[in-house]
Amino acid sequence: MTTSKLVDAQSYSMLNKEQKAAYDELKKIIDGWAHLSEAQKQWLDEACLLRYLRARKFKAKKAKEMLVGTMNWRVEEKPHHIPHTAIYSQATHLSNYVHGVDKHGHPICYMRFERDPPGFSSEEKLKYIKFNLEESLRIMDRNAAIYPGVEKLIYIIDLNGFSMTAPGADTGIASKWGDMLQNHYPERLYKAYLVNYPTIFSFFWRIVSAFMDKVTVEKVHWCNKAPGEKMQQYFLEQGFDLDLLEKPFGGKLDPLKKPNLIGHDDYEDVHHISVKGEKTA
């Protein structure tokens, strides 16, 4: 269903006087960077600058430092150029994948703890998380005509089978994932839903959330509804389209049975090109 309303994105015309001044200051800094390619200029578009400004409370110099940090991180990590071959063996376990959208068009990324595959290092698991973050951005771009202005994704994190001794209960991975979201994908998280969690998970969360900023923590919602009608009603009230929500969580969408990847191999990703930023002083 097509909507004309901008869901997440701001535009310059929507800013107040102080915010416009901050945007103009940041834009002037960016325009002073020499040797930016056309693809790099596209990456540094109005929406991108506004996300970084919002993340830094419209402090232009702090937003610039954050942008430079992301640019250099993307050059080093190349999350947008992770090939299928690097993550496909993990993807076959369907422990972490993007499938469907909510009624506003936010891509839904599922994390299924009980499917956490053995035999993969922390770095390999983080690479898979990066791939799916980028996959969500590709879906936003692909769906832009249907859902204009969507800039954020949703996580549904199914903690069925969680225990503190399980290999997947890695505070290091969870902390690094939170750091990536905050510092390199600012204003990209819409909401994260924790479902089917045991009581013991609250102790794990206490450790992980200590490394997250308050804004990110406030986007995490604890769904204590049992699978079935109560969980279905919960997600309906949260703004989900049941036709696009997987059945285990009260929706009508059949769960994925095999990986369904776009990936950079099949998609011209000009909006998320890595660029080498100017070093901060």
Image: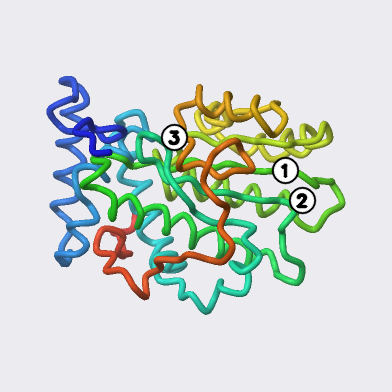
Q: Please give left or right for residue 234 compared with residue 144 in the image.
A: right
Camera-side residue of 84 and 72: 84
Quadrant of the snapshot with the N terminus? top left
Local secondary structure at mark 2: loop
User: Nearer the observer, disc 2 or disc 3?
Assistant: 3
Label 3 Cα crowd, 10 Å radius (few <14 / some 14-19 / many 20+): some
Image: 213 above or below 161 = above
Mark 1 to mark 2 CA distance (whole Å): 10 Å
Image: 245 above or below 134 = above
- The image shows residue 276 at horizontal and vertical percentages of 31, 65
The numbered mark at residue 169 is 2
Q: Which three-letter amino acid code belongs to the residue tagged 2?
A: Ala
Label 2 Cα crowd, 10 Å radius (few <14 / some 14-19 / many 20+): some
Q: Mark 2 vs mark 3: which is more N-terminal?
A: 2
Local secondary structure at mark 3: loop
Image: 32 above or below 75 = above
Q: Is there a contact, CB below 8 Å, between mark 2 and mark 3?
A: no
Q: Residue at x 69, y 26 (%)?
A: 225
Mark 3 to mark 1 CA distance (whole Å): 22 Å
- The image shows residue 234 at horizontal and vertical percentages of 58, 25
Image: 242 above or below 164 = above
Q: Residue at x 48, y 40 (%)?
A: 154
| Residue underneath mark 1 | 159
User: Nearer the observer, disc 1 or disc 2?
Assistant: 1
Q: Is residue 61 visible?
A: no
- The image shows residue 155 at horizontal and vertical percentages of 54, 42
| Residue underneath mark 3 | 241
Local secondary structure at mark 1: loop
Q: Is there a contact, CB below 8 Å, between mark 1 and mark 2?
A: no
Give the total of numbered labels. Answer: 3
